[in-house]
Structure formats: structure tokens, C-alpha cells
Image (cartoon, helix red, strand yellow):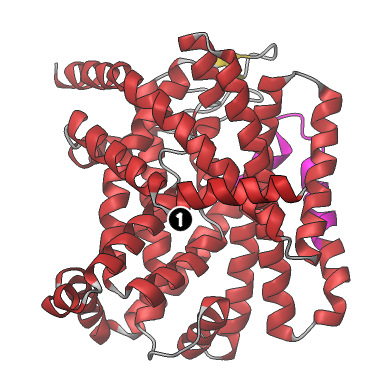
Amino acid sequence: MDIIYITINIVNEFLWGKNILVFLLLVAAIYLTIRTRFAQIRLFPSMIRSLTENEKSKKGGISSIESLFLSTASRVGAGNIVGVIGAISVGGAGSIFWMWIIAILGSATAFVESSLAVMYREKKNDNTYIGGTPYIYKNRLNLKSIGLMYAIFSIICYLGVTQVMSYSIVGSITDMYDLANFKRYISIALVILVALILFSKNKKKDSIISAINKIVPFMAILYTAIVIFILVYNYKSIIPVFKEIIEGAFGVREVFGGTFGTALMYGIRRGLFSNEAGSGNANYAASIVTNTDPVKQGFIQVIGVFIDTLVICSATAFIILLAPKTELSGMELFNHVMRYHLGTIGEIVGVILMFFFSLSTILAVAYYGKNALYFIKESKKIEIFYGIFIVLMVYMGAMIKNEFIWSLADFGLGLMTILNILLILPLSNESINKLNEYEKKKND
């Protein structure tokens, strides 16, 4: 076990610590932005129309907006709060500007990988679709063995993510209300909730999708309403905050003071790791839609990147920057600024947000994991066993912070990203050709 742990840490240090993944994702984002001729900006109105068209899904099928909810659930998690706070704490306000830039660039990567996922997915016996990066390897390149590797890395990553998120939920509750003695009971309650969602029967829709369809809109509306209230109440400070962000990104003091590079790096890292563009995670969500147009489905995932980074992460940043500076960090800082803006109720709202952000991520990765398992071996028994294992991971993560399991999330995600980028860059022409056909037809 020690050898495995050491090996995983060495891989993580190489991929994450040496910024290998940051460089790879950044190069891919810039390259695909140029190749698509900034489609994420040029065609943004078309992307919004694709979202509002929202075709009705067939029985058991998934509509485009449901796919968006699913990918948003996996993208939006504890990192949208704690990660943004970390970026500001280390890189300053200027890191937010670079986070915005990388979201815009990275959305081109999201478009390419998601459209490819639709092009090379498969139809199941019940006439619903399934797909993702493993299926592109299998159906386009006839490299099922590498697809299997990606699927295995996916499951490894999701088991780690599940524990991180369950720890975030229970930790935020027990820390806020000093309920450490009741940690076991809170953990059991969370386990029961997750199990009910995973194993409930729904003839019309997958139970996870049904739950996410309710959770994501609720948490998005709640967070948006809170941020709008805070912005309106602090309207005189909005321009100074924007000024602080821009100056932090380009200011003379930052350049000569040596903090420019820190702001740049932390902004890029936060943006890349939050929106997940390039990892292939969202391919599992993009490929299952009833919609057969790969371009329009690519557009939907571009919107997902924008929602995650330009909306949710930015909302967290403004909540932090509109409050007085403090030496606090992490959730302690978030709860402090929520209390500053909203009074006593702010702490409660902070816990509620962390609960829904993290719960939605647990459900999303559980769904992605089922798709990965289906690729490895189609078996109802294995799927049930996987669900039980996810429930156990939720309980273990809620009770104990296991550094080894947590490291699996970074390990799995890092290797997924490598395999996904090495796949989509050579195949990007196929996605871009579809985009050109779409634009030609649109302009005729």
C-alpha cells in the first residue's frame, strides 16, 4: 500500500506540482480557440438559442438542458467556493481576471471534446445513448484498450471526489454548529439520502438525472439571488472591486513586486481545474442527449463552462472581495463574509450552498462512473455493487479525511486529462468541419 501511495504522489507531483497539466490544457485551449476562430464568442447568441430550443427527450432519454444540468453538477462543487478563496488568498484579486480568460479559451476545448463525444457515442438496447472519451477511442480509433484505461481512471477519480465532497458537506455542518459529537449521525443521514437517490426507481428518467434536474436549478437560483442582493446592497463598491481585479492582473505594483506571475498562475489553474474543460468529464454528459447535432451539443457544454467559471466562481470572488480583508481562509473565510453580508442567516446559507454544491457533484460523478463501468462491462449486478460502493465512500469520506483516497481524485483526473487531450487534438478537425458545416448552413 505504501508503494502505491508513493507512486500516486509522484505522479500527482509531476502532473500537478510541476504544472504539466496546466501547460497542456492551456496550449490546447489556445490552439482550439484559434482553430474554431473564437467560436465561443462569435456564436454565443447561437449557443443561447440552442439552449432555449431544448428539444423534448424521448422516454428514458436526456434533453440538452438536462445534459447541461448534469455537467454543471459535476463542475460546480466545493472548489467553486474553497478553490476560488485559495486563488484570491495566494494570487490576489488579479487571479480572477485570468480565471475569466482561461474560461473563455477553455470553452473551445469543451466544444471540441463534447461534439466528438456525440459523434462517436453508442445506442443502447433501450434506444438511449451512452458515450464519452472511452467510446471515442473505441469507435473512432479502434483502441478499446486505451478507452478501458480512461474508464478505469474515471472511476478512480470519482471515488476520490466522492469522499472529498462528503467530507465538505459534513465538515461544514459540524464546524459551523459545533456538532462534532453528532458527526456519525449526520454522516448516516447523508448516506441514506444518497442511497435513496441512487437506488430509487423511476420509469421515465434515471433517478440521478431526476434529482439533479431539481438540485441544480435550485442551487443556481439561490446563489444568483444571494449574489444579486449583495451586489445591489454594495453597488458603490462594484467598480472599485473591478478595478482591484484589473490592477491585480496588470498593475505595475504586481509586475515589479513579483506577484504578477502568481496571480496569472493561480487564475489559470483555478479556471482550468474548475470548469474541467479538457479532462473529458463532461463527455459522459454530452454524449447521452437525445439531440443528434454534435455542434449544438458542443454549444451546450460551452455554456456549462461559462456558468461554472464566469458565473459561479465569479460570484464567490465578488462575495469575498466586497467584504473587509481578513486573515481567515477556506470555508471559515466564506462563512465569515456571508455573515458580514447577510447577518446571522449568512452562515446558514453558506452551509446550504456547500451542501447542494457538493451533493450535486457526488450524484454527477456517480452517474459518470456508471457510464464508465458500462464501457468496461455491461452488468446490472456490477452497477448495483458500484452504487453500494459509492454509498460506502460517502460514509467513509464524511467520517475521515483520508489523504490517500483524496489523492486518487487528482491521480485519476490527471491521467484522464492526458488521455483526453491526446485524443481530441488530433481529431479536432472533425469537430471543426462540423462547425463549418453548421455555419455554412446557418448563413445560407
Q: Is residue 207 visible?
A: yes
Residue at screen point 62% across, 61% down:
356
Q: Nearer the viewer, residue 305 or 410?
A: 410
Residue span colored magenta:
190-213
Question: What element does badge 1 sit on?
Answer: helix
Circle 1 packing at 10 Å, graded few (<14), some (14-19), many (20+), is few
Instruction: Please tell me how many numbered marks the rendered image carries.
Output: 1
Q: Nearer the viewer, residue 41 or 280?
A: 280
> Residue 196 lies in magenta, yes or no?
yes
Residue at screen point 35% across, 42% down:
25
Quarter of the rendering occupied by the C terminus: top left
Expressed as whole percent of the image width and height from the top left, the position of residue 259 reads: 25, 74
Query: Viewed as shown, does residue 328 lie left or right of 231?
Result: right
Residue at screen point 21% across, 42% down:
41
Expressed as whole percent of the image width and height from the top left, the position of residue 277 reads: 41, 41
Q: Is residue 52 visible?
A: no
Query: Viewed as shown, does residue 192 lie left or right of 349?
Result: right
Q: Nearer the viewer, residue 11 or 370?
A: 11
Instruction: Tell me the amino acid under the disc marked 1.
Output: Gly
Q: Which residue is mark 1?
A: 17
Expressed as whole percent of the image width and height from the top left, the position of residue 248 reads: 22, 74
Q: Is residue 244 above or below residue 133?
A: below
> Residue 137 lies in magenta, yes or no?
no
Q: Name the dominant secondary structure of the magenta segment.
A: helix
Q: Is residue 78 above or below residue 292?
A: below
Expressed as whole percent of the image width and height from the top left, the position of residue 412 reads: 59, 41
Q: Is residue 9 above or below residue 203?
A: below
